[in-house]
Amino acid sequence: PCFVPGPQAVPELEVGNFNPALAASAALPVLTMLAEDAEAKYGDSRRWSAVLVPLTTLVIPAVAMGIFTIYVSSDDAFYQFRAGHPRGMREEKELYSNPLYAGRKNPMEGLVNKDDFEKGLDEAWERAKPKGSTVIV
């Protein structure tokens, strides 16, 4: 009796309100009854074997051996992934000698008004910083 609310605290029932989350949670047990059991069937293993066996025994090893052969036989193989490779450094030097790419690594390159950008950055920090913060940008 102590957990039953008094008559003045009982909320009135509203007719016509549809709650989609409540409807979905009520339908969930029905959907789980429709699902099949998780069991391996004879036909499934044969179907997967027809794909996975050739893939793991023929395709993946052939690709790996081909990549390894190219890597071993050529000094310039995959030079894009090796930092400080002479060919990569030469191409980078050629790229930056072009006036269109001269300032490509400079993050401030291309700004119309650098001072306005920095002023806006300071204002944004002042608005976003936590109270009592002593960090100065």
Image (spheres, helix red, strand yellow):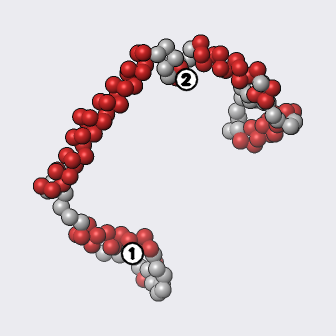
Which residue: 12% across, 55% down? 42
* Percent position of residue 125, x then y: 74, 38
Q: Amino acid at mark 1?
A: Ala
Q: Give the image quarter of residue 114.
A: top right
Where 84 falls versus 133 (above or below)? above
**Sooner in the amino-acid sequence: mark 1 or mark 2:** 1
Tell me the element at label 1. helix
* Percent position of residue 77, x then y: 49, 20
- On the rendered image, what quadrant is the N terminus found in? bottom left
Which residue: 76% across, 20% down? 97
Q: Give the image quarter of residue 37.
A: bottom left
Q: Residues within 10 Å of mark 1 (few under 14, many from 20)?
A: few
Say left or right for 48 vs 12.
left
Say left or right for 115 vs 133.
right
121 and 86: which one is in front?
A: 86
Q: Amino acid at mark 2?
A: Gln
Residue 79 in sight here:
yes
Which residue corresponds to mark 2?
80
Say left or right for 116 vs 47.
right
* Percent position of residue 22, x then y: 40, 72
Where 84 falls versus 41 (above or below)? above
Q: Give the image quarter of residue 29.
A: bottom left
Q: Which mark is residue 23?
A: 1
Which residue: 33% across, 73% down? 26
7 and 97: which one is in front?
A: 97
Report the Cα–Cα distance between label 1 and label 2: 55 Å
Which residue: 81% across, 26% down? 99
- On the rendered image, what quadrant is the C terminus found in? top right
